[in-house]
Amino acid sequence: MMSPEATNSFRQRYGRWAVVAGASEGVGACAADELAANGLDLVLTARNRALLEEVAVGVRKRHGVEATTLALDLTAPDAADQILAVTDGLEVGLLLYCRAQCTTPTSSSSSPWSCRCE
């Protein structure tokens, strides 16, 4: 975790809010956790509402930040409009796009590409 001075500097550079697309698991969930550890409040988007809520609860608990969730498919024609509606009025300075889809099923959660932040 960063020092309070470094956290303030990070927040000054990127603004109060970050949007993380694909935040329900893997790289997106870990990136969301790291951004929260650095003092940013989050708007988390992904298709899987249940996993997205788990990530939000975790970052709130571990880092004391605000975390808003938006379950949506980024390929939907109105996805940008939905994100704009949720972020209206927020000081968003960072967008992290981690959306991916695995086409090969994994046999276990021990995959090196799996990341769960505890």
Image (cartoon, helix red, strand yellow):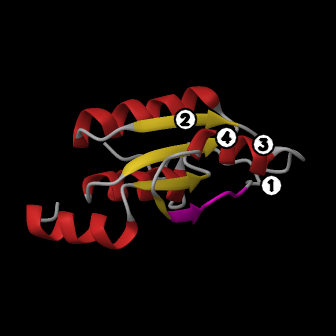
Per the model, the C-alpha gap separating discs 2 and 3 is 13 Å
Q: Which mark is residue 69?
A: 2
Question: Element under label 3?
Answer: loop
Q: Is residue 32 visible?
A: yes
Q: Over which residues does the magenta segment extend?
A: 94-100
Residue under numbered circle 4: 85
Q: Is residue 10 above or below residue 66?
A: below
- Look at the numbered discs 4 and 1 and tell me whether their residues touch, using CB distance below 8 Å: no
- 32 relative to 51 in the view: left or right: left
**Residue at the top extreme?**
50
Residue under numbered circle 3: 73
Q: Earlier in the sequence, mark 2 or mark 4?
A: 2
Q: Earlier in the sequence, mark 3 or mark 1?
A: 3
Q: Earlier in the sequence, mark 4 or mark 1?
A: 4
Is 105 within the magenta? Answer: no
- Considering depth in this image, is 114 or 48 the residue closer to the camera? 48
Neighbor class of circle 3 (other Cα within 10 Å; few <14, some 14-19, many 20+) is some
Identify the amino acid type marked 1: Thr
Per the model, the C-alpha gap separating discs 4 and 1 is 31 Å
Identify the amino acid type marked 3: Asp
- Look at the numbered discs 2 and 1 and tell me whether their residues touch, using CB distance below 8 Å: no
Counting the numbered discs, the total is 4
Neighbor class of circle 1 (other Cα within 10 Å; few <14, some 14-19, many 20+) is few
Per the model, the C-alpha gap separating discs 2 and 1 is 25 Å
Q: Earlier in the sequence, mark 2 or mark 1?
A: 2
Residue 15: give x, y in percent of width and height.
38, 62
Residue at x-position 10% and y-position 61%: 4
